């Protein structure tokens, strides 16, 4: 009985301990360059677990059948508690919107707009909304403008993670139109590139011009993951995900929809007498495919197919193409344009990943829009009636 229990113990120890050790979701994976003492500690705990039954035997600690039954009961309770916690987390915060997927943020702006207030509306995705506790560019733009102008100025952050140009248009028409903004600032690129990929869970074929095939933030509601699947994807993650290979991807089906949406927001602004500033979206993807995979954070999430993900050069070329489309569209309709990519060249330290910014990065972004607003003399011309 003791031998069987020892074998069972070692199997469980191997499966769970090494499963965690080789997972990308563990502490070990967060240590980019572990020191020699750290390696020794990890190795010690790795191999010491195998000798626990023998140590107990040497200490003359007798293991009765009840001990083993208790051990398995505790493992069962741990599994049950883990399963309950997993599903409670899956249900938490799963509110969704029929068209916008992620519900828009509630704005506390006054309606109707107070007389004499110059209101600026910033549309976009998470690069507008801000993430990671860093100050967003709308926050910093408002501070810059209030410092220069005595006017009553308000900058509203209407950015939302996962929002594409289409989400921004729907959000404006049905939630923000009554805010009566004097100026709209908008830029997008990467979120509109995502719908070009048709592999679950984020999307399914066939491609639809209205992005109806793209699940975005609701991907794991559309394709729910069971607790068992979660465990399988967690344990031995490095080994399980190693089969995916990078490949070049250029089938950017969403480009036409992106251009249509840009022209739509221009038409909306012109029909309502609202000033509009468009911009490209800065990034620090490398054309040489030489960035740290942990910095990219995109390789394993959006798949080309079951065996491939888009390599870094794919993202670089896609961003450049979508940014060129924004610039060409702005020039075609004589819309003021801000060139973010030029200002951020060689400043990778301002990025937290290929597109998101530190507070200092967002400050530079805010400065670019501030300079354009001053150049166009928009504030002195006063708010819309």
Image (cartoon, rainbow, N blue to C red):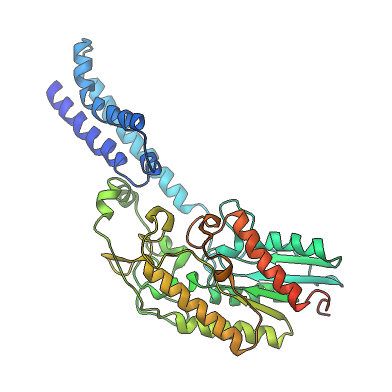
> What residue lies at 56% left-to-right and 74% top-to-bottom?
280
Where does the image place residue 307, in percent across and percent down from the top left? 26, 64
Quadrant the N terminus occupies: top left
State the residue in front, 376 or 168.
376
Picture layout, residue 172 above or below residue 266:
above
Using the rendered image of the protein, determine whether residue 106 is visible from the camera's viewpoint.
no
State the residue in front, 247 or 64.
247
Specify the quadrant of the image occupied by residue 310. bottom left
Where does the image place residue 253, in percent across and percent down from the top left? 40, 81
Residue 246 shown left or right of residue 177 in the figure: left
Picture layout, residue 265 above or below residue 139:
below
Quadrant the C terminus occupies: bottom right
State the residue in front, 176 or 125.
125
Residue 295 shown left or right of residue 99 in the figure: left
Using the rendered image of the protein, determine whether residue 10 is visible from the camera's viewpoint.
yes
Picture layout, residue 46 above or below residue 292:
above
Where does the image place residue 16, in percent across and percent down from the top left? 27, 37
Specify the quadrant of the image occupied by residue 52. top left
Where does the image place residue 306, in percent across and percent down from the top left? 27, 65
> What residue lies at 46% left-to-right and 78% top-to-bottom?
321
């Amino acid at each position: 009985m003791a031998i069987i229990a020892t074998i069972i113990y070692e199997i469980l120890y191997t499966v769970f301990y090494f499963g965690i050790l080789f997972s990308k979701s563990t502490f070990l994976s967060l240590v980019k360059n572990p020191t020699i003492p750290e390696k020794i500690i990890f190795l010690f705990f790795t191999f010491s677990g195998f000798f626990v039954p023998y140590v107990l035997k040497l200490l003359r600690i007798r293991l009765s059948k009840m001990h083993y039954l208790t051990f398995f009961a505790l493992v069962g309770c741990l599994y049950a508690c883990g399963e309950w916690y997993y599903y409670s987390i899956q249900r938490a915060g799963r509110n969704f919107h029929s068209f916008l997927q992620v519900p828009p943020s509630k704005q506390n702006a006054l309606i109707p707009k107070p007389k004499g207030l110059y209101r600026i509306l910033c549309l976009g995705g998470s690069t507008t909304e801000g993430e990671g506790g860093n100050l967003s560019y709308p926050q910093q733009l408002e501070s810059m403008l209030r410092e220069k102008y005595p006017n009553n100025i308000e900058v509203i952050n209407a950015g939302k993670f996962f929002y594409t140009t289409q989400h921004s248009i729907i959000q404006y028409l049905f939630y923000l139109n009554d805010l009566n903004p004097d100026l709209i600032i908008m830029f997008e690129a990467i979120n509109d590139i995502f719908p070009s990929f048709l592999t679950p869970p984020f999307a399914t074929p066939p491609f639809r011009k209205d992005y109806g095939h793209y699940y975005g933030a609701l991907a794991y509601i559309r394709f729910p993951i069971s607790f068992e699947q979660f465990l399988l994807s967690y344990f031995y993650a490095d080994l399980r995900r190693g089969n995916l290979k990078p490949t070049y991807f250029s089938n950017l089906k969403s480009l036409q929809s992106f251009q249509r949406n840009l022209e739509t927001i221009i038409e909306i602004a012109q029909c309502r007498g609202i000033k509009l500033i468009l911009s490209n979206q800065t990034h620090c993807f490398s054309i040489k495919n030489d960035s740290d995979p942990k910095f990219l954070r995109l390789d394993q999430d959006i798949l080309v197919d079951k065996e491939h993900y888009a390599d870094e050069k794919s993202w670089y070329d896609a961003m450049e193409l979508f940014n060129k489309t924004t610039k060409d569209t702005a020039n075609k309709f004589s819309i003021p344009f801000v060139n973010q990519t030029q200002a951020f060249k060689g400043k990778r330290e301002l990025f937290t990943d290929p597109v998101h910014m530190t507070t200092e990065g967002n400050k530079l972004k805010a400065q670019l829009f501030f300079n354009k607003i001053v150049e166009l003399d928009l504030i002195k011309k006063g708010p819309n009636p």
